[in-house]
Image (cartoon, rainbow, N blue to C red):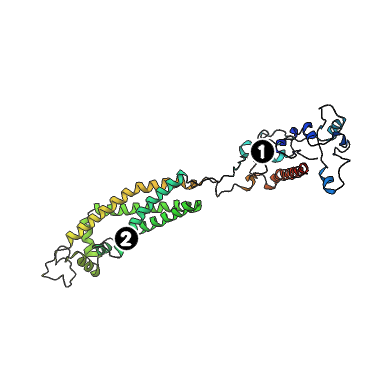
Amino acid sequence: MLEEADIGTSRFAHPLSFGPADVRQRNYPISNVNPTTGNYRNSSAPSSARNSRLLNVRFPFDVSPDNSTNSLSTQNQDEMPPLPAPVQPWLNSGGGSSHSPRTSIMNVDGSSLHIMKRYMHDGVPRKMRWSKHKWLLLVANTLLFIYGLGASMLVVLTWFKLFERADTVIVGEPVLLGLVTAMGGLCLLTSLLGYTGIMLNNRGILAIYNVLLWPCFALIASVGYVSYRKNKWNLEAKLRNQWHDIFDRDDRSRVQANLRCCGYKEFADWPERSSKCFPRTLLPGCKYKYQTLTKSGLIYTYTITFLLLPVHIFVIFVALLCSNHVNRKFGKGLPPKIYRIDYNAVGIVAADPTTKSDMLTGVRRKESQRRQYRAASKRVVTD
């Protein structure tokens, strides 16, 4: 017995909407209905196989033209099994009885029931727009790129000695220069990784991006702390000890050549002899120039890095909140298999997370059979 009598047009969407007037409209004489099987028979129908196949239509309900009591409808009504009640798991989630044989599948606890509504596509392509989270993440990552690029350019200029006092900085501040190099390189690499994740909407890349922001924060704070500590805690004594005990002959020679000085306080204080540094030289000692250059460099370093810390905290905060909202998709774009909706099949799919995916194929199979029957019915009306 067919489950739905939708024949021909969309106004017969429900079996109860197919009435006697529609039977007369399609010229189905009630007298030619077989009272035993309920099939339509036509003595004047052609003997071709196509017509004999198309005329075999069953009506599981009363088709009397005047809505009067008919022995055929009474007989078929006694023989036909009752229609199963619709499955409504949201009404039977508390463990009560259900009229459907699928009660064991759909009778689940309300807290574990997931209902997904049908979304009808209108056929008009939706204009892709960036979300506000994506724009905010792009702005924050651009800030990270700016100060990462600035620090990287500064260390490159220093290592390649492209400004006047670069050699003195390399010799006098090797630890601080190494920290700035690591900080600039890591911040620049992290920002490029962030741009990649933003443009590709890749949450995996953005997760790595969020992790790398914390080492960047640690390096920025380390640069500020080291420069501040060295500047505030007896800088003069530290520089004197550095000249006398830490520098070797090559280091002192490079500082003297770069600053155009001789010895630390004067020529007699640990000089490194050269063509310009000799007993009767007119060059001053290196203490004042070296101390002034170091002090100003340290002040600029810790001031800039401490100003960057709030900016970097803002970048971390934005990255944590917005990395998972670069688009409007659920995860990577597909829900779990048991929750995937066939838009041509059902309007609402209800399932339990423990339900196997093959338990939901029965609804789709029945709907496929209905669509095939509708197509055949349309061909009947057309022919």
- Is 207 on the left-hand or right-hand side of 27? left
Image quadrant for the C terminus?
A: top right
Where is residue 283 drawn, in percent x and y?
Answer: 13, 66
**Do labels 1 and 2 touch, CB within 8 Å?**
no
| Residue 46 visible, this orientation | yes
Residue named by callout 1: 108
Examine the image and state in which quarter residue 176 appears.
Answer: bottom left
Q: Residue at x 81, y 44 (%)?
A: 54
Quadrant of the image containing the N terminus:
top right
Residue 365 at x, y = what percent?
A: 72, 45
Under mark 2, the amino acid is: Val
Q: Is residue 268 left or right of residue 245?
A: left
User: Residue type at mark 1?
Assistant: Val
> Looking at the image, which is closer to me, 304 or 230?
304
Image quadrant assignment for residue 132:
top left
Q: Which quadrant of the figure has residue 6?
A: top right
Residue annotated with mark 2 = 155
State how far apart marks 1 and 2 are (Cα).
64 Å
* Residue drawn at (64%, 37%) of the image: 109
The answer to which of 285 and 122 lies nearer the viewer is: 122
Position of 52 compared to 242: left or right? right
Relative to 293, is 324 above or below?
A: above
For mark 1, give the secondary structure.
Answer: loop
**Residue 210 tag number:** none
Q: Position of residue 188 (x, y in %)?
A: 39, 56
From the viewer's side, name the closer residue of 239 and 126: 126
